[in-house]
Amino acid sequence: MKLIKRYKNRRLYDTELKKIIKLVDIQRYVDEGIEIKVIENADGKDITVQTLATVLSTSARSSSTLRKNESILKRLLANKGADVMDAMKKLTLAAIGVINLSKERLEELFDELVKKGEMTSNEKAEAMKKMADKVESSASKIKDTIETRVTAAFEKLNLSGRIEDLNEKVEQLSAKLEELSRKLEEK
């Protein structure tokens, strides 16, 4: 397993190659079937799932890249689906947070314009209302886009069918294990 450390400055370090790498290198490792583990250098916390979700989100621009990223999606799903959803939720919240920061910055600019007399308080209120509507619309679009892409990825991977297959195999293995246990007890 290839160990990757992430430092405070967000740089990724391949401990085997002893060099700084980029997200595209992680994508290449996954595509090549190389098992990776990404940890925070400071506390050793495993951040593999979050890193893979970041790789996926930065490279997912079209349906052709979705096919290319199938190995990353499979790896993410193999590493606990709940963590994947948590990572996607964090990415969504980060995108919405950027929009809110922009809103705060615009409000500061409007306040400056009011102070300078270039804009009235009523104009500021109207501009803020328009901006709030756009922020809400943008946040909704981001959420819808992410939900659509995640749903498409899950459908493309045929998860429900695979889960059913896995459940069936587990049941078969359990039955064989019980049979072997009975045979051992009889001896």
Image (cartoon, rainbow, N blue to C red):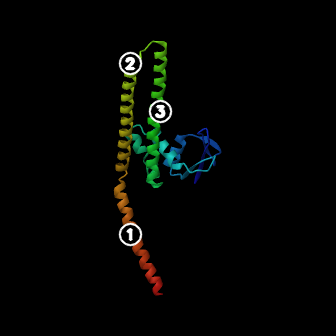
Q: CA distance from mark 2 to mark 1?
A: 68 Å
Label placed on residue 118: none
Q: Are marks 3 and 1 in contact (CB under 8 Å)?
A: no
What amino acid type should be assigned to the residue bearing mark 1? Answer: Glu
The mark closer to the camera, 3 or 1, is 3
Q: Position of residue 17 (x, y in %)?
A: 63, 46
* Residue at 41% from the left image edge and 71% from the top image edge: 173
Q: Position of residue 96 (x, y in %)?
A: 44, 35
Residue 87 lies, with reference to residue 106, above or below; the image says below
- 137 vs 171, nearest the viewer: 137
The mark closer to the camera, 2 or 3, is 2
Q: In the structure shown, which secondary structural element does the residue marked by tag 3 occupy? A: helix
Q: In the structure shown, which secondary structural element does the residue marked by tag 1 occupy? A: helix
Residue for badge 1: 171
What amino acid type should be assigned to the residue bearing mark 2? Answer: Asn
* Residue at 53% from the left image edge and 45% from the top image edge: 26
